[in-house]
Image: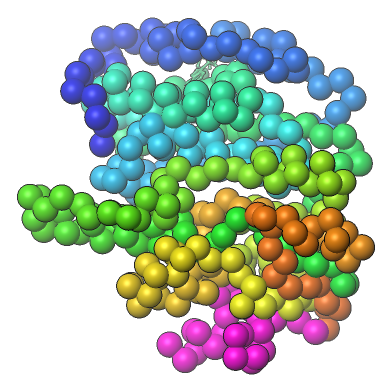
Amino acid sequence: MFENEERTNIESLGEFGLIDYLTKNIKLTQPSTIKGVGDDAAVLNFENKKVLISTDMLLEGIHFDLAYTPLKHLGYKSIQVNLSDIYAMNGIASQVTVSIGMSSKFPLEAVEEFYEGVYLACEKYNVDLIGGDTSASKQGLVISVTSIGYADEKDVVYRNGAEEGDLICVSGDLGGAYTGLQLLEREKLIYLENPNIQPDLEGKDYIVERQLKPEARKDIIDLLKEIEVKPTAMIDVSDGLASELLHICRQSNKGCSLYEEKIPLDPMTFETAREFNLDPTVCALSGGEDYELLFTVKQADYDKIKFKMDITIIGYITEPSAGCNLVTKAGNVHALTAQGWNAFKSNG
Ligand code: ADP
Ligand code: MG
């Protein structure tokens, strides 16, 4: 789906013409970027910092559906999901590379729209686009982004540092991206059955944006620095709260108690989940793509954290033999699983 009416054939530009066209306006802003696009490799200089590198691939039909994903949003999201991994290490993101494989039928205007989103995200988060690769694809649109960042060694936060008694915190709210996706999928089916019916997403902007245009939580990393809290462990929520918390617990060799009533849900997420006969808690636990930060902090940091608007304490870390548990609103204790929790799976 692209909005521009004009269609310029990519083949008329050729590969080099296309790359040049897409990258000619790049303005490098990072002091660590010595050489960006234009040579066989980019050249970076991080002096005495530790360098962080992360890659993610986005495939049409697996990770996105062009039927309801505007290309500008897709470009923006491709960058966000990658920057999120750098922030989850408590790092500062500084460069990205963007590689794309696309059908030769893809018009230039469509690629341009995608790059508008890429550049918007780069500008907003202050990262340089320093390279990539461009190829034809017979299997739909393929996007691969690599993000590069840096941190002082003492600031890097791993998944494995959680200690017994640490508080489990999460930024923002959860489950929105998943309920947004349910909505978009429903409207797509309605449209396919009757193309005269316009999609009805009235009043659902928040969760639709959570799905199509997520924001990596650089602001949370900045906030933690400002209040001088270094998390003991951290991960970004790409696969759902349950799965991410289990990663922290497994890698830290600890257990946890997570409180259902504490899980932050936006009212629109709650309402929409109900509309779809979904349990809102399960949407948060298993939905994914929220790109919030899940982290643990020492109890001594409680006073610094407790009144922070966009951070919620949702549980605490326990000894490993206690297991990883969800305490439900009714006060029942269930083993947490990557799919949500056992009771939901077995009781249907
Ligand atoms: P090579 O033949 O060495 O792979 P390319 O012709 O693919 O070189 O790329 C030339 C330059 O353009 C390189 O600096 C590369 O990083 C950059 N580049 C290629 N494709 C893209 C893209 N899709 N986005 C940004 N930069 C790109
Ligand atoms: Mg190349």
Q: Nearer the viewer, residue 347 or 57?
A: 347
Q: Is residue 17 left or right of residue 294?
A: left
Q: Quadrant of the N terminus?
A: top left
Residue 127 seen anywhere in this rendered image of the structure? yes
Locate residue 99, reporting x and y percent. 49, 28
- Asked whether the viewer can see residue 161, the reply is no
* Along the viewing direction, whichever of 240 and 57 lies nearer the viewer: 240
Q: Is residue 236 above or below residue 182?
A: above
Left or right, 290 with reference to 138? right
In the image, residue 80 above or below residue 343? above
307 in relation to 97, above or below: below
* Pick the front one: 199 or 320: 199
What are the residue bounds of the magenta stretch? 322-348
Q: Residue at x 57, y 60 (%)?
A: 173
Residue beneath the point at 43% across and 14% down: 22
Residue 55 vertical placement versus 233 (above, below): above
Relative horizontal placement of residue 34, taking residue 317 as reference (left or right): left
Q: Quadrant of the C terminus?
A: bottom left
Q: Which residue appears at 92% of the width and 63% of the height?
A: 300
Residue sitting farthest toward the front: 307
Total labels drawn: 0
Q: Residue at x 53, y 66 (%)?
A: 265
Q: Could you say where residue 220 lies in the image, as x and y percent from the top left?
A: 70, 46
39 inside magenta stretch: no
**Percent position of residue 116, x then y:** 42, 24
Residue 212 coordinates in the image, percent (x, y): 41, 45
